Amino acid sequence: MLQTATRAIYDEDLGLFRDQVRKFYAVHLTPHLDRWEEEGLVDRAFWLACGEAGVLCPQVPAEYGGLGLDYRYNAVIGEELSYAGSTAGITLQSDIVVDYLINYGSEEQKRKWLPGMVSGHVITAIAMTEPGAGSDLQGIRTTAIRDGNHYVVSGSKTYITNGQNADLVFVVAKTDPAAGSKGISLVLVETDRAGFKRGRNLDKIGQNSADTSESFFEDVRIPITNCLGEEGRGFAYLMNQLPQERLQIAIAGQAGAQRAFDEAVKFTKERKAFKQAIFDFQNTRFTLGALKAKLQAGWAHLDWCMARHLKGELTAAEASAAKLFHTELQWEVCDAALQLHGGAGYMNDYPIARLWRDARVQRIYGGTSEIMKEVVARSI
């Protein structure tokens, strides 16, 4: 179980909130994990339950239906979700997508979409990656070209989290293809518009319950008022929001690593070999002791990052370093924990198998570990 009593960044109110979130997941999440993995999709009913429980977009101001809380509450939701072994796309909506609307949306856009995002009636996705453009967003080819008082959106996107469930997609598109990064904008595309098509639910190595899709835009007409913020400022907006996105991934990584470690401790203390518990072998104890030391340092670093972020001081390089460190730690712990399970670790009957599979992509999306190293290096 996640230990929070000694973490100075949390107080009694957050402790009570964490208890509520943990109990909510125990009823509405954990019993359905296996079925969602098989179906490749999280029920919309879960989103509505999250909304009713206050687990969606807690930072949304009260005038738009939210709780008006600070990012620590998002962190609690994300930590508990990852520790529970789920990759449901609620953190994408709460930690990444919604802040684009809060920070850059018009009053009309906020009043139209934020209440539904808080309640779970509106599920969102953000469409950045394309078949030919991943980490280099300046290489995107999707366009949103003005035609009178409309944009005509054309192109395709891939690896879109919440792609099957989404009601609203935040699309990164070129409104001025000749202007480079200054020609990139964010536009809102409702998925019931003519010309929008969902692709297949992609077959992934892990994170099977997180619907990840292709999206196609075939001359989709949207009003000019669906531009988020200023036209041509999309790339700047993306860069501004990256620290929180990468912090969110780091949070999931640290909590996932802790769960994998706890599973390894439980298994090695229960399973016997050569007439003693596997835990009692020196190799097991040394492995777990080293991992526990790294986890201890990881939690302290994560709280330092969150404290910086709450003050608006977390830099892009610091967030990238956090994403790099915590996702690499997650993979190290998950892989070591699976090894300590022996043959059982390769069986889907044990939670470590899913934790291991789901961890692999953490070092890729949101910026690969190699890109993170480059960002950090540029700050030296």
Image: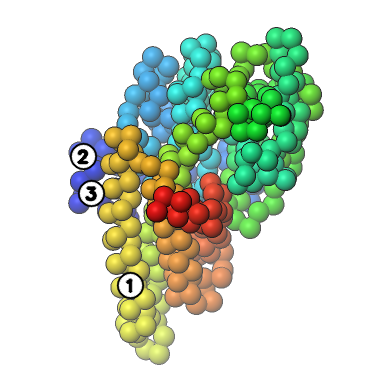
Please indicate, yes or no, whether residue 113 appears anywhere in the rendered image. no
Instruction: Report the quarter where the C terminus lies.
Output: bottom left
Q: Earlier in the sequence, mark 3 or mark 1?
A: 3
Q: Which mark is residue 117?
A: none
**Relative to residue 258, is residue 311 depicted above or below?**
above
Residue 11: numbered disc: 2
Residue 95 in sight from this viewpoint: yes
Write down the quadrant of residue 281 in the picture: bottom left
Please state the horizontal and vertical placement of residue 186, each as a whole percent of the image.
60, 26
The residue where tag 1 is placed is 290
Q: Are marks 1 and 2 in contact (CB under 8 Å)?
A: no
**Residue 97 pos. (x, y %):** 51, 32
Picture layout, residue 204 above or below residue 110: below
SS class, disc 3: loop
* Amino acid at the residue labelled 2: Asp
Residue denoted by label 3: 7
Depth check: give the residue in front, 279 or 315.
315
Residue at image point 33% right, 57% down: 298
